[in-house]
Image (cartoon, rainbow, N blue to C red):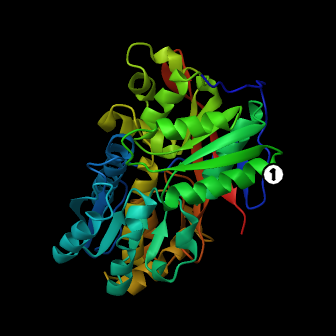
């Protein structure tokens, strides 16, 4: 039986890489976003129909779907309570690039003016051309692939989560701080997996850590071959870039002698039930395993917890998608797609700070240039629709339970 040799160390600060800086500190904006009703704007907002294409089923339903859907639903309720006029149409992406386009077409046929989703970068790619051709704005709360930043058909696309460089740095810093010197990176064979694997390898190299990569088919009937490849690398840590299949791979790694504290998971696997799912009879076997995820503010996360039973992954980002779209429609004076997408960057940067739909809407109708700081952080959208400031939580399994141990704000250098 192969075994991974481990070099452990404790402590460790956050070293920075070119392109991003991660700081374990208080949020850049000290004011918490307001979620209670505030004064309604003095003019009626146009009715905005939001179609959400999120994972009710499929490989991301358990880890992401509940919080994403809850985030959008909470936003719609808050917007309408604060003088907005939003209607929500529901659709399942099924975490499937063959199913999601059909859902999008249905929602557009039912009158959706804008789309929120999909959960996975690869699934969003399956219908982004359709929305570009139709000039329908799309906001993604959990797509981290760098591809969207440069592709021509992303002209009606923006996102409220930082590109994968943010997550890769949080992950690389955590692994290096624990003494990793040679990391085995195992990534699923899709856009998300390939892009994050390359970024993680680059970030580890910046920190003086070597790495090797193995790519796997997430639909494979068994991951024994993948685990065998990881063990053959003789690494002292494993970075696992996966979705639902990561549970089976993690379980097999531990069975084959890899210490759980040598394993680090990505956001697609952030789930407070991970310890029990890996080992239902002895969750403490998973002690030391780490995982990070984009997150909302502590106050907002508690609202999501009440609906999901403890999972808030990407919920804040989904909430901010809906608020930004509603504010953009108000600023544009209607539901015209090109006007809405043009307004998006301008309402999240370089203006008067505001922290809720109602507060911001009142300023918009007064002609004030606003800078919406949301429940997921300051945002600071750039011209291609990428958020340049993001908030992450780092969690570790302790005594059989996944606990948040640190909050990290990441700024992507321009």
Residue 50 figure quarter: bottom left
Please report the residue visible at 22 percent of the width from the left and 69 percent of the height from the top: 102
Circle 1 is placed at which residue position? 206
Q: What is the quadrant of the C terminus in the image?
A: bottom right
Q: Position of residue 370 (x, y in %)?
A: 53, 70
Residue 370 visible, this orientation:
no
Q: Nearer the viewer, residue 191 or 164?
A: 191
Q: Position of residue 164 (x, y in %)?
A: 59, 57
Taking the image as shown, residue 122 lies to the left or right of residue 78, namely: right
Please report the residue visible at 43 percent of the width from the left and 30 percent of the height from the top: 272
Taking the image as shown, residue 265 lies to the left or right of residue 309, namely: right
Please report the residue visible at 54 percent of the width from the left and 29 percent of the height from the top: 253
Q: Position of residue 81 (x, y in %)?
A: 28, 56
- The correct choice, above or below, for 297 with respect to 322 in the image is above
- The correct choice, above or below, for 53 with respect to 187 in the image is below
Q: Secondary structure at mark 1?
A: helix
């Amino acid at each position: 039986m192969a075994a991974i040799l481990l070099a452990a160390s404790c402590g460790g600060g956050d070293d920075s890489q070119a392109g991003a800086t991660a700081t374990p500190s208080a949020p850049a904006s000290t004011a918490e976003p307001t979620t209670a009703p505030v004064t309604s704007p003095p003019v009626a907002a146009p009715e905005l129909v939001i179609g959400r294409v999120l994972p009710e089923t499929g490989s991301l339903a358990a880890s992401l779907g509940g919080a994403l859907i809850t985030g959008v639903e909470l936003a719609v309720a808050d917007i309408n309570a604060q003088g907005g006029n939003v209607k929500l149409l529901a659709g399942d992406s099924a975490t499937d690039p063959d199913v999601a386009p059909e859902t999008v077409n249905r929602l557009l046929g039912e009158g959706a003016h804008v789309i929120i989703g999909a959960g996975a970068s690869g699934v969003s790619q399956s219908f982004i051309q359709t929305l570009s051709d139709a000039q329908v704005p799309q906001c993604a709360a959990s797509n981290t692939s760098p591809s969207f930043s440069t592709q021509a058909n992303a002209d009606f696309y923006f996102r409220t989560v930082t590109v994968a460089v943010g997550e890769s740095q949080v992950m690389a810093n955590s692994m290096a701080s624990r003494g990793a010197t040679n990391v085995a990176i195992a990534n699923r064979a899709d856009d998300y997996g390939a892009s994050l694997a390359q970024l993680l390898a680059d970030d580890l190299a910046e920190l003086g850590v070597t790495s090797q990569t193995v790519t796997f088919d997430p639909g494979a009937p068994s991951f024994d071959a993948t685990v065998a490849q990881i063990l053959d690398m003789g690494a002292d840590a494993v970075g696992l870039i996966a979705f639902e299949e990561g549970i089976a791979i993690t379980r097999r790694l531990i069975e084959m002698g890899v210490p759980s504290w040598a394993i680090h998971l990505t956001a697609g696997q952030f789930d407070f039930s991970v310890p029990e799912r890996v080992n239902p009879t002895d969750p403490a076997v998973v002690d030391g395993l780490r995982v990070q995820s984009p997150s909302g503010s502590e106050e907002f996360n508690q609202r999501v917890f009440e609906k999901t039973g403890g999972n808030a992954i990407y919920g804040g980002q989904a909430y901010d998608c809906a608020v930004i779209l509603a504010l953009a429609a108000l600023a544009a004076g209607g539901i015209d797609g090109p006007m809405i997408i043009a307004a998006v960057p301008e309402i999240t940067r370089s203006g008067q700070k505001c922290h809720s739909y109602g507060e911001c809407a009142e300023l918009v109708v007064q002609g004030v240039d606003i800078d919406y700081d949301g429940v997921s952080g300051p945002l600071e959208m750039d011209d291609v629709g990428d958020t340049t400031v993001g908030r992450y939580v780092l969690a570790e399994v302790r005594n059989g339970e996944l606990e948040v141990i640190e909050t990290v704000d990441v700024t992507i250098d321009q």
